[in-house]
Amino acid sequence: MRKTALITGIAGQDGSYLSAFLLAKGYRVHGLVRWDNRNDPLDAFEPDVVLHNGDLTDANALSMLLKRVQPDEIYNLAALSHVKVSFETPASALAINAGGTLNLLESIRVLGMEKSVRFYQASSSEMFGGSPAPQNEDTPMQPCSPYGAAKLSAYWLARTYRESYGLHVSNGILFNHESPLRSVDFVTRKITKAVAEMEKGRLEPLVLGNLEAVRDWGYAQDYVEGMYQMLQREKPDDYVLATGKAHSVRDFVVRAFSQIGLGLVWHGEGLGEEGRDARTGRVLVKVDATFFRPSEVHVLRGDAAKARRLLGWQPRTSFDDLVALMVNADREALRTGYEDRAWMQAG
Ligand code: G4F
């Protein structure tokens, strides 16, 4: 019997990789997508993936959808996922990330689907906030952003529904995971796209915020397998997925420029700091207050021993390979004219 999966947030990076992964396993895939976030016309016909317009905050519509689709597995990936934006729209962060999760869990319960559905909740390492690294499933959670607080609320709702109603609900506590599909609103893709553009002649420097923040960056494609593996376990549980290796934003920048043969030397400090081309002295990187957050999670480095032990999961892509594949994808996108070239006029 073919299984049916419903993925909320299917249009995002993880949704895209996960749907490809599940299709290859023979699943029927349904996806929930906000109508203004679709990159296909509303009446497009896609035989392998059925897209449904919807929004996690619309509880009745979600219930109707679950009743219609009758999924075996639900992957709740939809979220307001940008940490800095969550400081600007905290109520939306809470409504979507926590309220939306509640709407799904409550729909499962009210429809009596507790025994037929398995549920994956996209929890986040941002929930650890200020807790010292390395962080694992037992590390105290001390979020320091509306995003982290909302995700923590969803995490506890998921656990509550598991323990109170016997739902098969697992939290995947994922550390940062990136890819060429990442939006440029996130620091890794912002860097790799700028580096590829500079190689092609862009003149303006790359402008960033906090260069000292340390993250545990993995490759998104490796992580969606872990999501799937969690739902194949007989018993639901919570798992950290991470590489265990940490690098600063500065490390990422240096590595990305080295990919196009440029070395950086740093001058100045704080907001006045600049990264210059070691050979020509040209300014390639600047720092600006716009990209700092009201409060910052300084160091995230995960310990995924439990996922390794119980799921057999481990990341396959190193930091260096991740940076290389992202820079190369952006170079290729420019070469084929896939990305827009607005920066050319601006430069
Ligand atoms: O790429 P980021 O915006 O990712 P962040 O905030 O760590 O969140 C991502 O990972 C979480 C998992 O831990 C997810 F839950 C979340 O949904 C998202 O996917 O920022 C990474 C670091 C931050 O410390 C930020 O302050 O980079 C720093 N940074 C420095 N300059 C910047 C910039 N971040 C962005 N987005 N843009 C900058 O110019």
Image (tube, helix red, strand yellow):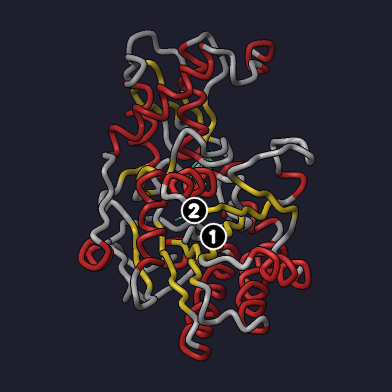
Mark 2 residue element: loop
- Residue 162 circle label: none
Q: Residue at x 44, y 37 (%)?
A: 179
**Is 297 or 322 nearer to us in this picture?**
322
| Residue 315 x %, y % | 28, 48
CB atoms of marks 2 and 1 within 8 Å: yes
Residue 210 lies left or right of residue 262; in this view the side is right
| Residue lying farthest to the bottom in this orientation | 164
- Residue 27 circle label: 2
Q: Amino acid at mark 1?
A: Thr
Q: Is residue 224 above or below residue 76?
A: above
**Is 185 or 13 nearer to us in this picture?**
13
Q: Quadrant of residue 316?
A: top left
Mark 1 residue element: strand
Q: Residue at x 74, y 57 (%)?
A: 54
Q: Does label 2 or label 1 sit earlier along the sequence?
A: 1
Q: Residue at x 77, y 36 (%)?
A: 41
Asked if disc 2 is less than 8 Å from ligand 1, the answer is no
Q: Is residue 190 above or below residue 109?
A: above
Report the number of numbered marks.
2
| Residue 271 x %, y % | 51, 37
Asked if disc 1 is less than 8 Å from ligand 1, the answer is no
Q: CA distance from mark 2 to mark 1?
A: 6 Å
Q: Residues within 10 Å of mark 1 (few under 14, many from 20)?
A: many
Residue 275 lies left or right of residue 155; in this view the side is left
Q: Quadrant of the C terminus?
A: top right
Q: Amino acid at mark 2?
A: Tyr
- Residue 4 circle label: 1
Q: Is residue 323 above or below residue 295?
A: above
**Is 210 or 307 nearer to us in this picture?**
307
Q: Residues within 10 Å of mark 2 (few under 14, many from 20)?
A: some
| Residue 297 x %, y % | 44, 58
